Image (cartoon, coloured by chain):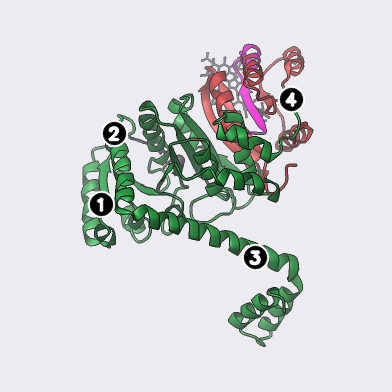
Amino acid sequence: MKNDAAPIRVMMTKLGLDGHDRGVKIVARVLRDAGIDVIYAGLHRSPEEVVTAAIQEDVDVLGVSLLSGAHMPLFGKVLDLLREKNALHITVVGGGLMPDEDVAKLKEMGVADIMRQDSTPEQIVATIRRVVAERSDA
Amino acid sequence: MAKVAPMDLVAGVLKGETVPIARLLSCAEAADDASRPALARIFEHTGKAHVVGITGVPGSGKSTLTAVLAEEFANSGRKVGIIAVDPSSPFSGGSILGDRIRMADIAMNPNVFIRSMATRGAMGGLSRGCLDAVDILDAAGFDLILIETVGVGQDEIEIVQAAHTVIVASAPGLGDEIQAIKAGVLEIADIHIVTKCDRSDSNQTIRELKGMLKMGDLTKFIEGWEPKVIGTSSLRREGIAELAAAIDGHRSYLETSGEIVARRRKISETRMLKIAESLIRKRFYEERLGSISELCGQMERKMIAPDAAARQLLARINGE
Ligand code: B12
Ligand SMILES: Nc1nc2c(ncn2[C@@H]2O[C@H](COP(=O)(O)OP(=O)(O)OP(=O)(O)O)[C@@H](O)[C@H]2O)c(=O)[nH]1
Ligand SMILES: [Mg+2]
């Protein structure tokens, strides 16, 4: 059980060449202000780097922000690596800019949820709490 | 995936497997009673690692230094575990842990494991569960454990109760700050680092620091170890090999002089007493809530002095 003694841990990061970092920083602050521990892993990371870091940090949620349009291959790679490294206990949540049809596909592939533009702080916090509560091993 | 019991992670930790190590670290951080037996088993396998604390004012370059130092050790084949502590927000209890960003170059090194921890209300520059985390990394076979404390100012010197070798990082251009922190933090250093020595004002800082150490408390000289002052540039990777050698030198000094025995004893003692303190506090609240409010009431009416009230509380918990 996740309780007060064990705050939720979320890693926030961006993959590839995408330099739009306003969103990822805002989300990090929103989550911190909701009592969550946020590990900020920075920009321009590779899928290998974030998966390695997420496993070492044992985060509940790996949050990836993407506005570059390269979300399909990048999320695919992240999910493959988590599977390969026996780390599917880590939930992936996405955010940023992507079309409806891609959101549907990403959810099918295993991304727990996608929060796009105009998501309110309340919605973001509620979504993170919900996906953590839904974790089968939490 | 089924919920993993802490005890089931122990075997994997002892084999040095990443996922069990990471998950048991979370149990240690949660500090729930359910993980005590597993942590006790882990404790039996500790005592091999050398624990290095890296402290200094905010922004002095601790994370960047920790990363290049870890790389130096890892490249010579040693396994390095890093615990990077950042502060929790006193308002929400949440945190943004950013030390890892400075460690990107070593994040994929197979000899390096990095874990970020939030202070969670713990005072003194370390996190709650930090010493249990050190145990886990030690038992998992890491040769060196580097603890980066939160940025400290005056008296957050708890790192001396956790580390065998303490490094204090000072940045150039912070002359006044060095003055300000000398009372507490500078005196705990086994090794002083002046960081960012690619900057032109660094020589002056080294001079000032050396001058201040000459004037200061000399107990460490008497003990036989003269705190070194080393200039480093993490950007240019200068002074890093020298620092690694100084850490190994300090370790051999501790062992040949027998000083390590005293340090270990100090660490055991403070660790045990702190746990005992928190257990007593917990018992007060669980068993003596009535007594607490009764005695507070008496204090407010000036019927009993604070010291006498505390003694009565203690007497009551010892089963009157
Ligand atoms: C500001 C901006 C910039 C700034 C970025 C400043 C910065 N440091 O962030 C600058 C001027 C630098 C810039 C540059 C470029 N940009 Co620009 N930029 C924008 C713009 C106008 C707004 C983005 C923004 O900051 N939004 C505000 C933040 C807060 O919103 P957000 O990131 O979506 O985050 C929210 C949610 O999505 C969610 N969220 C986000 N991530 C996550 C993650 C998780 C886990 C969760 C739960 C939630 C979550 O929470 C946030 C709060 O609600 C958009 C247009 C638009 N309407 O989006 C274009 C846009 C993103 N840019 C675009 C382009 C093309 C570029 C450039 C390539 C332009 C060029 N040719 O040079 C460069 C590339 C820069 C780079 N290295 O990547 C395109 C992208 C097109 C695409 N994806 O196919 C856009 C859509 C404009 C357009 N219509 O063409 N850009
Ligand atoms: N010029 C120069 N800048 C450096 C060097 N090392 C670190 N810095 C810069 O100093 C700033 C702080 O570095 P950090 O390593 O994050 O410092 P820190 O002490 O860990 O900071 P906190 O964890 O926030 O207390 C960053 O902007 C670094 O890029 C160096 O060797 N030379
Ligand atoms: Mg730091």
Give the letter of the chain under mark 4: A
Residue at the image point whose x is 55% and y is 46% from the top: B44
Q: Are marks 4 and 1 in contact (CB under 8 Å)?
A: no
Residue A93, horizontal then vertical, whole percent:
69, 26
Q: Is mark 3 within 8 Å of ligand 2?
A: no
Label 1: which residue? B209
Q: What is the spatial separation of the Cα atoms under label 3 and label 2, in whole angstroms?
A: 46 Å
Q: Which chain is green?
A: B
Label 2: which residue? B241
Tag 3: Cα neighbours inside 10 Å, few (<14), some, or many (≥20)? few
Badge 3 amino acid:
Arg
Q: Earlier in the sequence, mark 1 or mark 2?
A: 1
Dot 2 falls on a residue whose secondary structure is helix
Q: Are marks 3 and 2 in contact (CB under 8 Å)?
A: no
Q: Quadrant location of ligand 3? A: top left
Q: What is the spatial separation of the Cα atoms under label 4 and label 1, in whole angstroms?
A: 53 Å
Mark 1 or 3, which is nearer the eye? 3
Residue A18, horizontal then vertical, whole percent:
55, 19
Residue A95's quadrant in the figure?
top right
Of the chain colours in the picture, the one used for chain A is red
Label 3: which residue? B281
